[in-house]
Image: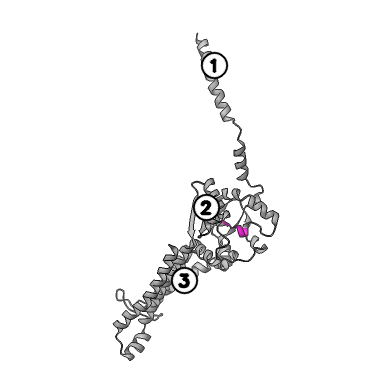
Amino acid sequence: MVDNNSNTDEEEQSPMSTTRSVTMTRSPSALEKHVQSCLTLTDPTLLRTMHVEDLLRGFAWVLGSSDCGEEHYKLSRPADRANEFISHNWSTPRADKFLSLALHYNFVPAMLFAAAAAIITFVLEFQGILPCIHKEFFNFRSTGWIQVIGVVALSLGLCFHGDLAAALNCRSGPRLFLDRTCVCQTDAELKRRGIANLAAILYRSDTLVVLYTDVYLKKLWTVYEITMYLLIHPRGRLVFQPVVFAEVVLSCIFIVTVNRACFAIYNGPWVQDRLLHHMKLDPELVSDQLWWFVTIPLCSIMTVALRKWA
């Protein structure tokens, strides 16, 4: 009796176990095979990356409008993965892309450089080595040097950090995939193979950096890149960097710097002693007029920049 029941149970369970075994050993469909082949590099050396410092040195000369040559391709090396994939339109001006990339990659080192310059300036002011321009702040004769020199140092850090790091051979930034340097543009066959493996390269990219412009979603290649990345990495890291954002930020920094510099010069002894006292002018009246004269044009420039961004 026990044997019959056990046999019956085995007979009842056998169809389900058979179904499970069939499901477990199901062969991939043609579509799955095609997707797998698209995400597999036909040649591992086709995935190449470059240092971010090499991209940004020389005001990002590799993004210029000139044709790509061997000097571009030599900047990249074969790699297993790309830390970041740069998606951009070739028609976007080089200056716009450089400012956007510099703000994205060089902002932290530039801020550290600016902070160091500001601290040194403060010490020089405190020791009386730098001439005081205007007073204040807890009976300490402060000046506009800190703001002006700090912003100048920030600008230099943004523009030349890549050149300095490359000169010192201190390339510690992320490794990037950039089509102009990582896909050979002089060998037609190598270029064709690189383009054919673009999906596999995106599959091996950790982050997609989008240099967004008005034409970004109107060009086939950039639409393909962002669509393919989102399909392959639904929860991947997407950095959306509008190129006009850098222009707005740097314009605001420039406006504040010019404003501070104008009032620092006005409060300097060469203006207060030589012009106002000799010409018998009211310092308060001149200060008010200078405020309107300096602030209104700068605010107009800022409004235009913000309008362009909007």
Question: Relative to residue 76, is residue 304 drawn left or right?
Answer: left
Whole-number angstrom distance, CA of label 3 to CA of label 1: 82 Å
Kindly indicate whether the residue at mark 3 contacts the one at mark 2 (C-beta within 8 angstroms). Answer: no
Identify the image quadrant of the C terminus: bottom left
SS class, disc 2: strand
Q: Which residue is mark 1?
A: 11
Residue 145 is situated, as x and y percent measured from the top left of the image, at: 40, 76
Residue 241 is situated, as x and y percent measured from the top left of the image, at: 48, 59
Coloured how? one colour
**Nearer the viewer's eye, disc 2 or disc 3?**
2
Q: Is residue 178 magenta?
A: yes
Q: Which residue is mark 3?
A: 153
Q: Amino acid at mark 2?
A: Thr
Q: Nearer the viewer, residue 266 or 127?
A: 266
Circle nearer the N terminus (2, 3): 3
SS class, disc 3: helix
Residue at (60, 57) in percent of width and height: 179
Q: Which residue is mark 2?
A: 207
Q: Amino acid at mark 1?
A: Glu
Residue at (41, 69) in percent of width and height: 302
Q: Amino acid at mark 3?
A: Ala
Question: Relative to residue 263, is residue 38 drawn left or right?
Answer: right
> What span is colored magenta in the figure?
176-181
> Image quarter for residue 57?
bottom right
Residue 236 is situated, as x and y percent measured from the top left of the image, at: 50, 49
Whole-number angstrom distance, CA of label 1 to CA of label 2: 53 Å
Residue at (66, 47) in percent of width and height: 42
Q: Is residue 104 magenta?
A: no
